[in-house]
Image (tube, helix red, strand yellow):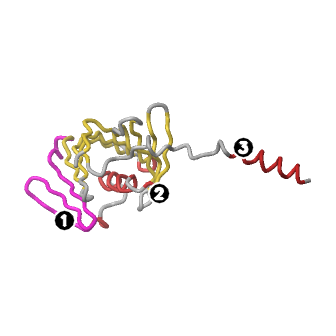
């Protein structure tokens, strides 16, 4: 009986030695603390082009470039404030009044989530890393970045029909 239990224990030990988390923290590179990028945003029937920047202090700035009617609209978000600046006008509001589905709010919350490794899962797909998570306001997202460089490729919110495609990404300090 002891031999059988010993053999089972040894077999189980050998079997489980191959079990490990498939995410290699050394290769998983979520978004930098501070960065800037050009993004193409598609949300339902609407499309936008914008310059975005995230500062190390958590400030997130979105400046729309297209459509032409919204060129120059700047949305600045912090933990305590959200402001809109356009054509010399400035409106400030608490972030809680910004709809959860607003593209700038979705992006900001996803980037916050990606800074906390306990709030997302990562998996390698070919040469890319795919990070899946849920923002604090309940939006599920998938963030895809190049595995070796960490350069963002896309950020998707399927339930919001929101896709963000990155270009000209630069990590900043």
What crowding class fits label 3: few (fewer than 14 Cα within 10 Å), some (14-19), or many (20 or more)? few
Disc number placed over residue 92 in the picture, else none: 1
Residue 103: % across, % down: 32, 51
Closer to the camera: disc 2 or disc 1? Answer: 2
Tell me, yes or no, whether the two marked residues, 3 and 2, touch with CB atoms within 8 Å: no
Which tag, 1 or 3, sits closer to the chain's start? 3
Count of marks overlaid on the render: 3
Mark 1 neighbour density, 10 Å: few (under 14) some (14–19) many (20 or more)? few
As drawn, the residue found furthest toward the left would be 88
Q: Residue 56: which numbered mark, if any?
A: none
Q: Which residue does the numbered mark 3 point to in the structure image? A: 15
In front of the other: 113 or 100: 113
Q: Is residue 127 left or right of residue 9?
A: left
Where is residue 64 drawn, in percent x and y?
20, 46
Tag in front: 3 or 2 = 3
> Disc 3 versus disc 2: distance between alpha carbons?
27 Å
Q: Position of residue 9 (x, y in %)?
A: 79, 50
Q: Residue at x 28, y 36 (%)?
A: 167
Q: Of marks 2 and 1, which one's residue comes earlier in the chain? A: 1
Q: Residue at x 32, y 54 (%)?
A: 108
Which residue is disc 2 drawn over? 118
- The range drawn in magenta is 67-94
Residue occupying the far right of the picture:
1
């Amino acid at each position: 009986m002891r031999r059988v239990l010993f053999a089972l224990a040894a077999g189980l030990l050998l079997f489980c030695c191959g079990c490990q988390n498939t995410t290699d923290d050394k290769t998983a590179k979520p978004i930098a603390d501070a960065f800037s990028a050009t993004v193409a945003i598609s949300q339902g029937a609407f499309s936008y082009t914008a310059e975005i920047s995230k500062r190390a202090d958590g400030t997130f700035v979105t400046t729309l470039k297209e459509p032409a009617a919204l060129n120059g609209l700047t949305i600045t978000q912090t933990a305590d404030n959200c402001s809109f600046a356009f054509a010399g006008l400035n409106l400030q509001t608490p972030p809680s009044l910004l709809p959860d589905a607003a593209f700038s709010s979705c992006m900001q919350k996803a980037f916050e989530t990606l800074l906390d490794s306990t709030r997302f899962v990562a998996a390698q797909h070919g040469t890319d890393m795919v990070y899946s998570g849920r923002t604090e306001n309940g939006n599920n997202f998938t963030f895809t970045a190049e595995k070796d460089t960490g350069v963002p490729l896309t950020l998707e919110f399927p339930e919001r029909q929101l896709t963000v495609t990155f270009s000209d990404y630069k990590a900043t300090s």
